[in-house]
Amino acid sequence: MQARAALATAAHQPLEIVTLDVAPPQAGEVLIRMKATGLCASDLGGLNGKAPRYPFPMVLGHEGAGEVIEVGPGVTAFQPGDQVIPSALPECGVCKLCLSGKTNMCVRQAVNAPSRLSYNGQEVTSFCGTATFAEYAVIQEMRLSKVRADAPADTICYVGCGVITGVGAVLNTAQVKPGSSVVVFGLGGIGLNVIQGARIAGASRIIGVDINAAREGVARKLGATDFIYSSEVNDAVARVRELTGGLGADYAFECVGSTALARAAMDCTNHAWGMGVAVGIPGPGQTLDFQPMSFLTGRTWKGSILGGERPKRAVPDLVDWYMDGFLNIDDLITHRIVLDEVNHGFDMMKSGEAIRSVIVF
């Protein structure tokens, strides 16, 4: 069969809308008709050549929602008609890491998923094993979560990355306690979900920090008690300490992928028990620079990929939370576009105009 898709042919080049050939699913694989997909900063990173494990040409996209069309041999957890959300992280369920109960990192994460996509006879890489910028994609069963059929695909697609990453970083990785103080550096599609995760956790003071003053309104709607417009504040760290009575925040989240902001996040935490959490993904070759005394006094620094959550369990729950009105996703999806507008979607991401753009197929 064939599918229209946005094809990345080289770093820093606009995506091209092409028609791909899609091979049938093999053992353990599922053919998905994509209904909608979000544009995430990680996709932009892949387009800019910051994910060298995924060679060009490739189909980006990892934040989708779609319908099962066909299952390959051995697939028993899904059947045609199921609504599913793919994940960048596989969950084989049988390796030592999956069985440990300590991590969401599966040993299969180190192996690129096979691609069933090709263009003019050449194999096309499936970014994150999902390739949700295509109308049809073949995805491994271990990367799919079944969700309720009545949930709108053009909204819940956001759960597959932005929502689970932000909310999970608070509730799962940091395990923020009620009454705590939280500061969030970077209020993009991930950071704003950290804000609402902190609200759900019962944090009493939630401070958002961003260079875009337009993010204040939505941040406060999601639960922020304070907003620091960093373009007008000379020392955001000092301002955070002032807002937290001089002690510093109990928890700080870096949601941009900036090593400088990571250092600022650590510096503004309580020196005795503060926790810094890296949520944003720095570019290749970057390093963090922390003073050893930052940790000797009791601080900790943790990393969080996909909120540390196991998608097959967490994704359906988060969709239920949205459908029950407990989780706000609607205010975070600012633009719905068609596939042909994908490059404009990335332009809106880079300018800060969009929080989350969603391609509706």
Image: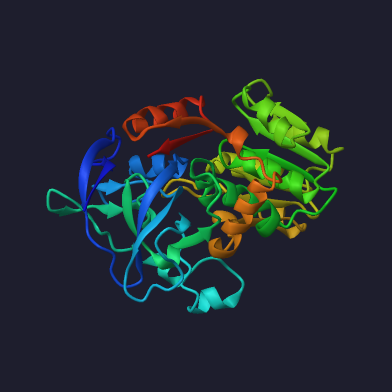
Q: Is residue 229 above or below residue 241?
A: above
Q: Is residue 168 above or below residue 74?
A: above
Q: Quadrant of the C terminus?
A: top left
Residue at 47%, 25% in the rendered image: 351
Whether residue 54 appears in this view of the structure is no
Residue 92 relative to residue 316: left or right: left
Residue at 64%, 47% in the rendered image: 323
Instruction: Give whichever of 76, 113 is nearer the camera.
Output: 76
Whether residue 225 appears in this view of the structure is yes
- Where, by quadrant of the figure, is residue 264 drawn? top right
Q: Is residue 297 above or below residue 190?
A: below
Q: Residue 138: x and y, percent?
A: 32, 59
Instruction: Give whichever of 118, 280 is nearer the camera.
Output: 118
Residue 345 relative to residue 180: left or right: left
Q: Give the colouring mode of the picture.
A: rainbow
Q: Residue 16: x and y, percent?
A: 25, 36
Q: For the image shown, how many numbered marks are present on the structure? A: 0
Residue at 77%, 50% in the rendered image: 201
- Where, by quadrant of the figure, is residue 80 drawn? bottom left
Residue 87 relative to residue 328: left or right: left
Q: Residue 316: x and y, percent?
A: 58, 58
Q: Residue 240: x and y, percent?
A: 76, 35
Instruction: Give whichever of 74, 222 is nearer the camera.
Output: 74
Q: Determine the residue located farthest toward the left in the rendered image.
A: 121
